[in-house]
Image (spheres, rainbow, N blue to C red):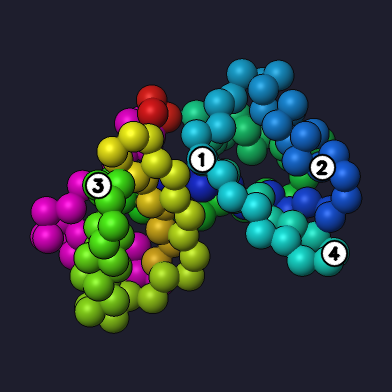
Amino acid sequence: MLIKQLSIFLENKRGRFTEVARLLGEAGINMSAFTVAENSDFGILRIIVSDTEKAIAALREKLYAVSVTEVVCLQCPNNPGALAKAMEIITNVGIFVEYMYAFSQGETAHVVIRPDDLEKCVEVLQANKLTLIAANDLYKL
């Protein structure tokens, strides 16, 4: 249930995200989810793609700094309070969330979570009958 996520360091200048999107598109790699965090000097593009290894190779060939981390993707109802319930479960067992981002489709929300303890997070969410999305399923959304 763990998903590989790429973190790409980008200069904070016009066109950098466009270059990455074009590069991945030309390589036939689909972006399933992403978020960008930035400061005045650089940004970090966190992205889940259809072919992690191919994306890494394509990006590194163009001299992008890329690292790989694992994340969890929770599926929950897209309604008020659903995420709060899931977060309470995680928080109550002492798991710290380093960051997260989400997207929704109709009545379903998908939340990408980077906890400090991946295995414990997966275990507690599954024990509470919450739905986790596997990498292959995320790419199909």
Between marks 2 and 1, how big is the CA–CA gap? Answer: 17 Å
Residue 1 visible at all: no
Residue at horizontal 26%, vertical 62%?
A: 81
Q: Secondary structure at mark 1?
A: strand
Kind of residue at badge 3: Pro
Residue at horizontal 29%, vertical 40%?
A: 108
Kind of residue at badge 4: Asp
Q: Which mark is residue 77?
A: 3
Which residues fall within the magenta stretch?
116-138
Q: Which mark is residue 67?
A: none
Q: Which mark is residue 16?
A: 2
Q: Secondary structure at mark 4?
A: loop
Q: Secondary structure at mark 3?
A: strand
Report if the CB atoms under discs 2 and 4 are less than 8 Å apart: no
Kind of residue at badge 2: Arg
Between marks 1 and 4, how big is the CA–CA gap? Answer: 24 Å
Residue at horizontal 82%, vertical 42%?
A: 16
**Sequence-wise first label, 1 or 4:** 1
Q: Judge from the rendering whether residue 96 lies leftward or rightward of residue 125; answer left or right.
A: right
Q: Which mark is residue 41?
A: 4
| Residue 89, x across and y down, in percent | 21, 70
